[in-house]
Amino acid sequence: MTGRTVIRGGLVITASDEIHADVLIEDGRVAALAASGTPAAEAFTAERTIDATGKYVIPGGVDAHTHMELPFGGTFASDTFETGTRAAAWGGTTTIVDFAVQSVGHSLREGLDAWHAKAEGNCAIDYGFHMIVSDVNQETLKEMDLLVEEGVTSFKQFMAYPGVFYSDDGQILRAMQRSAENGGLIMMHAENGIAIDVLVEQALARGETDPRYHGEVRKALLEAEATHRAIRLAQVAGAPLYVVHVSAMEAVAELARARDEGLPVFGETCPQYLFLSTDNLAEPDFEGSKYVCSTPLRPKEHQAKLWQGLRTNDLQVVSTDHCPFCFVGQKELGRGDFSKIPNGLPGVENRMDLLHQAVVDGHISRRRWIEIACATPARMFGMYPKKGTITPGADADIVIYDPHAEQVVSAETHHMNVDYSAYEGKRLTGRVDTVLSRGEPVITEREYTGHAGHGVYTPRSTCQYLN
């Protein structure tokens, strides 16, 4: 552990404040802040000084939705915990919360242990776990209580993917009732998978096999219907609800209505829904397969409603749902049958930059950028103020961000272990310069100086927006 570091001359931006301040770091934590140029700041002494003049000093990003090494559709997500967390650091993200998977017929504990084994000693940045619950039974429900006690405080269920992750309404209700008692948070993939499967079968029978039909069968109305149903089941159970990867304006409307009723309902969206659309799914020569994810990309007119939801706080978090599959050999499994294309996009490296571009474009403010990408996900999943802000006592997960640097996103230069970029050729203003994880430099002036094994498992408290 290096001793003390001081970051001088930058604009410190958190969800609540913007202040020209120097930041003193000691033993991996923020020790003090003082307005730049004041005697208090001048008194900071350290072995290492970082000059942040003309740059932002922001909390490291918290990406609360990633899938490293996820088995899906007969293959695996192409990023390991090693490659994925390194890429996250390059993009200014210093904490991920990944999804451990319970397989049907197995216990939650087996799934969690398997994910610990994948991640331990391999991560460049800190990480936590949510638990995917695929098999609700009496034993599973008891295990949920134990997991909450040890810091796995959120559980994901699927209204989609019958035969794989799917839970029916009765199973969902039981899990929600349990989370109402133990303080856990249910995260919901809200799409009517039973109805979607019928539409998939009918589309394929008509010879509609191209990637664009993936978007057409997974209808926005079936996302809205499932969102509504999840909200009402949570209301019956007296439980909070977090809806993942919201993509459709009709689903945003359901969340807004529930929140207007005072229900503890939260929503997340992802950069792909804010910046991409069905135009990408329709790209010729099977290129559209690169953009197959679920919930699917929507027509462009949905984007404005998602940005509006982020401004009005009907959507609170932007995560990536990072789940990369290579075009060659993985996405290609679905040539001639869109339902066989592995679902997922790479994005863990792009989120902070894309959201800064949204600041430049006038969609959101600088503080809202930090709120939706750092502070709120940390609070939502019980890691604040250790993560998600810059304040005395917080982990020194800090990004020196150059708001004027220009970059062109490309698979040629990204660090994710995948052979394409979902944002290929996109010009962005703003770029990560230096990244500290618990005070240790992981990226130093655009050089990778981190190492696998620096990142440690982070147990979490329960959602900090409740009670």
Image: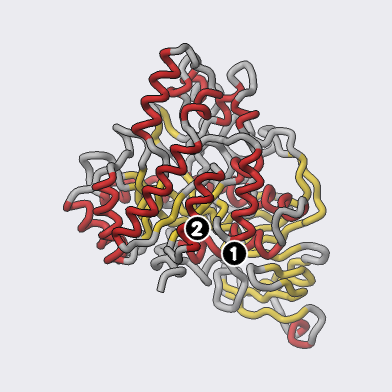
**Residue at point 29% right, 59% down?**
237
Kindly check if marks 2 and 1 are in contact, taking CB atoms under 8 A apart as contact: yes
Query: Pointer 1: residues within 10 angstroms few (<14), some, or many (20+)?
Result: many
Q: Which mark is residue 29?
A: none
Determine whether the residue tagged by mark 2 lies in a helix, strand or loop: strand
On screen, residue 194 versus residue 282, left or right, reads left
Q: Amino acid at mark 1?
A: Asp
Q: Which mark is residue 126?
A: 2
How far from the left and from the top, in percent, is residue 26? 60, 75
Q: Is residue 454 in view from this perspective?
A: no
**Residue at point 28% right, 45% down?**
169
Q: Is residue 435 above or below residue 192?
A: below
Front-most of 75 and 272?
Answer: 272
Q: Which mark is residue 397?
A: 1
How far from the left and from the top, in percent, is residue 357? 73, 50
Q: Is residue 134 in view from this perspective?
A: yes
**Residue at point 71% right, 80% down?**
45
Nearer-N-terminus badge (2/1): 2
**Residue at point 35% right, 51% down?**
131
Q: Is residue 18 above or below residue 66?
A: below
On screen, residue 344 versus residue 239, left or right, reads right
Q: Amino acid at mark 2?
A: Asp
Front-most of 393 and 319?
Answer: 319
Q: Quadrant of the C terminus?
A: bottom left
Dividing the picture into quarters, in which one does residue 39 lie?
Answer: bottom right
Distance between the Cα atoms at labels 2 and 1? 9 Å
Q: Is residue 74 above or below residue 97?
A: above
Front-most of 59 and 258?
Answer: 258
**Which of the colour schemes (rainbow, by chain, secondary structure, one colour) is used?**
secondary structure
On screen, residue 145 versus residue 432, left or right, reads left
How far from the left and from the top, in percent, is residue 411? 66, 33
Determine whether the residue tagged by mark 1 lies in a helix, strand or loop: loop
